[in-house]
Image: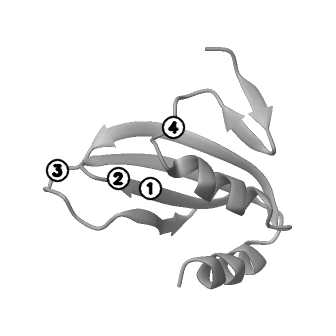
Amino acid sequence: MAKFRKSGVKLEHSILEGLDKHLKALSQLSSVSAIIPGRIFRAQKGRGSHGIFLKYQTKSGYKLLYKAGTSVQEVFIVCKDKDEFLKAFKDLYP
């Protein structure tokens, strides 16, 4: 699959079903420069919580995890302002 961007989201890998609506919402935030969906892997434990979760801060932004059933996908956010993104993320996903 060729690499391309759609609304600030780099589409090099496939994405889990349901993640696209979260990526669209996150791409609308003014502090977000780019969104890079990462690898998909199987969760070690059984069915847990569903949704998108903040994992940790990186040099360029944040790493998020999207959980859907037993599948988990990494999502990397490149930010202009990390504090502004964190506040906006917490407002979107309390």
> 71 left or right of 77?
left
Type of amino acid under label 4: Ile
Q: Secondary structure at mark 2?
A: strand
Q: Residues at badges 1 and 3 in contact (C-beta under 8 Å)?
A: no
Type of amino acid under label 3: Gln
| One can see residue 79 in this view | yes
Colour pattern: one colour
84 versus 61 height, above or below: below
> 27 left or right of 58?
right
Q: Residues at badges 2 and 1 in contact (C-beta under 8 Å)?
A: yes
> 54 left or right of 27?
left
Q: Position of residue 60 (x, y in %)?
A: 70, 57
On the image, numbered disc 2 is attached to which residue?
A: 68
Lower sequence index among marks 2 and 3 = 3
| One can see residue 60 in this view | no
- The tag on residue 15 is 4
